[in-house]
Image (tube, helix red, strand yellow):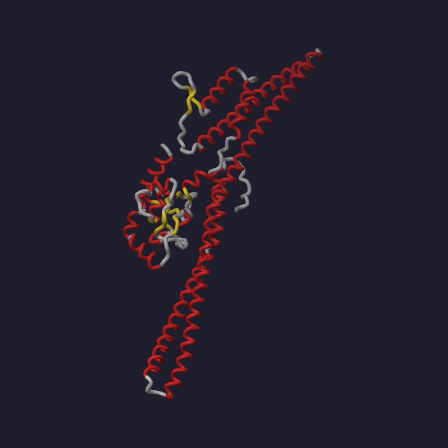
Amino acid sequence: MSPSCFFFVHSLLLLPLFSQAYLRAGSGAGLKVQQETGRAAEACTCDCCLSEVAKSFHSKLACVPRGGSTSLLTEVGDGGCQTLCLKPNEGKVAEFFADSGREVDYSRFCMAACQPMGSSKDLLCADKEEAAEQAPAPVVALVASAPAAAASGLASSPAAAESGIAADLARRTHLEQGPLGAPREVESKDASGTGEEERVAEQLAEAAVLQAANRATQAKQAAALSKYAYEKLAHSRNEAAEAAGQAALENVIIDARKDAGEAAQIRLGWEETARAHAAQKALVAAAVYKNAKVKSLSIADAWQQSAADLLKVGKQYEEYSTRQQMGEREIKKQLLADASNSELVAKLHAAEVAVEHGMAAAKKYVKQANAAKDEAARIRANGAWYDQAEAAAAAHAMYADLPKGVMPPPLPPLP
């Protein structure tokens, strides 16, 4: 199945997941809330999608919107995310929403363009295309060394071992024999191919280790036979035969030690490669939360700047009201001298209205400025959550990628 087909089918399978909850909440309600706040729709991003349990799909994880009505299903808040967003202009997601308008609902975007990271809920989702592009190279360092080691070992093995190991190595490669004897490429079961390459690399390494162990076992058996022959010859008076047996025993022991050392080196190289691959996986998982934290802090800075602007406008209105009050006092003094002047009465009334309007506007803008400050403080307070989630995602990705029996390395420095 091509990547585009898989992308489309995956989106269709996840579409019924939150349709009922979305219909109960009403898409019109989300649009109304967004219009009341006066915020324009921003570009769609997977940072506004969280992984939640999809009960209709055997308790697997799926991406849901972080903001809007579905934010009640999460435990981390909406993070300042909206209900609608601007769809991308290029890529597979743009093709998927080609028939839609400029703005799309986050409930559709999260299911079509994002995928869960790890196996825990309430974690930020990652972009499918970016995750596929940033995936590290598979563990294939041993693919080239393992066949060479196998070829060197086949020269000294018995005929039966030669045929068995050669057949096993031929069966584990990426090429299979066609109907006319010409090699043809085996179709990969994985769209990216990384899983198959990792499996082949591990199998080739295991084959090389088993071959070296087989040679070591044969060498030990030969050593035992030589030792037995040496003990028999020890009772003989033939010193020449005794020296020959001793030399043969020493040669066999040297060969056994050499084979065991080669097997240990192959194993150590495979473990180091696996650790490096797991550390790269950890960095990829941590980068998602690092980028989300940077974006969240930038939003907090915008709220702080908005609070400063609103407070400035409130002070301007307050100064305006003060000037009108001074004018009102001056008019009242003039009316004491000429109470029947209708023009002064009209000016006094206008000044009183201006004072009242200015004070009301000043209080309104000060209230809005305080609300903006509180929003900025709330967003910054969530920064610790991003740090904890970054470390947890990196550790989970690293341990999940390590093969069994491999000692995990220290967690690499996170970005």
Q: Quadrant of residue 196?
A: top left
Image coords of residue 312 (percent x, y): 45, 67
Image coords of residue 314 (percent x, y): 42, 68
Q: As displayed, is residue 337 above or below residue 60? A: below
Side of 319 where 37 appears, left or right? left
Residue drawn 39% across the image and 46% down it: 51
Residue drawn 45% across the image and 53% down it: 296
Q: Relative to the observer, which residue lies in front, 290 or 119? A: 290
Q: Residue furthest bottom?
A: 337
Which part of the image, by quadrant, shows the N terminus?
A: top left
Residue drawn 43% across the image and 65% down it: 310
Total residue callouts: 0
Q: As displayed, is residue 266 above or below residue 124? A: above
Q: Relative to the observer, which residue lies in front, 128 or 227? A: 128
Image coords of residue 125 (percent x, y): 41, 46
Q: As displayed, is residue 13 above or below residue 70? A: above
Side of 218 where 17 appears, left or right? left
Image coords of residue 272 (percent x, y): 55, 35
Q: Relative to the observer, which residue lies in front, 306 or 408? A: 306
Q: Quadrant of residue 232?
A: top right
Q: As displayed, is residue 36 above or below residue 108? A: below
Q: Relative to the observer, which residue lies in front, 228 or 344? A: 344
